Image (tube, grey):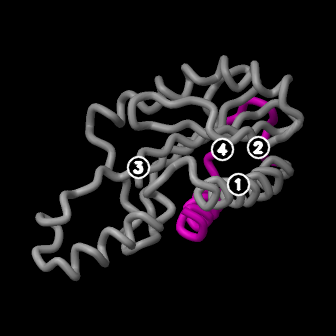
Amino acid sequence: MSYYFAIISPLDTPLFEHEFGTSKSGGDGQPRFTEQARHLNQFILHSSLDIVEELQWTNGQLYLKVIDKFFQNYITAFVTASNVKFLLLHQPTTSVPANAAAPNTAQAAASSRVNSTSVGANPTSPQTEEAIRNFMNEVYENYVKAIMSPFYKAPNMEIRSPVFRQRVAAAGRKYL
């Protein structure tokens, strides 16, 4: 599964962006977006901001779950108390036919079990929702630490801290 994570300010300007892939089920952590999809990721996330702003007033939670779907891309949102939005676009891996991936029937059965139970197999499953919720909560804790820095000028300064980027990547490896 490929992920594109963005933090959007209350004025709808991007504060932070990061692309990564899954590290679970033998993943290497590299995003698998096509070149065309990389250009569309920002557009897809920003087009879902209206839905986030509508849902944040009807739902009392910070974590809004999957709020939008654009073809095979799912958008999950988390809204902070200061109206900063964390948006995660996740694109499930396209399944490879079992006979192409594993010529042996035993290997094909084992690979289908791994794929059907992995976090990336079903973007709306409870396991995936819980993994994304944990990822968002950890990023939120690191975000609060980053903006408490005396060198950060809230609310619209881009987050350029390499430590913050490493912590977001570590949370992605840990949960997604």
- Closest to the camera, between mark 4 and mark 1, is 1
Whole-angstrom CA distance, mark 4 to mark 1, is 22 Å
Q: Quadrant of the N terminus?
A: bottom left
Is residue 162 in view from this perspective? no
**First-in-chain label (3 vs 4):** 3
Whole-angstrom CA distance, mark 2 to mark 4, is 21 Å
Residue located 38% across and 65% down the image: 115
Whole-angstrom CA distance, mark 3 to mark 4, is 28 Å
User: Mark 2 = which residue?
Assistant: 63
Name the kind of residue labelled 1 in the image.
Arg
Label 4 environment density (alpha carbons within 10 Å; few <14, some 14–19, many ≥20): some
User: Mark 3 = which residue?
Assistant: 92
**First-in-chain label (2 vs 1):** 2
Residue located 33% across and 34% down the image: 37
Q: Which residues are magenta?
A: 151-176
Name the kind of residue labelled 3 in the image.
Pro
Q: Are marks 2 and 3 in contact (CB under 8 Å)?
A: no
Horizontally, residue 24 falls left or right of residue 129, namely left
Secondary structure beneath dot 3 equals loop
Question: x, y percentage for residue 12?
Answer: 67, 22
Q: Name the mark on residue 133.
A: 1
Residue located 22% across and 57% down the image: 96
Whole-angstrom CA distance, mark 2 to mark 1, is 7 Å
- Closest to the camera, between mark 3 and mark 4, is 3
- Closest to the camera, between mark 2 and mark 4, is 2
Whole-angstrom CA distance, mark 1 to mark 3, is 17 Å
Secondary structure beneath dot 2 equals strand
**First-in-chain label (2 vs 3):** 2
Does residue 148 sit above or below 138 in this rendering?
above
User: Mark 4 = which residue?
Assistant: 159
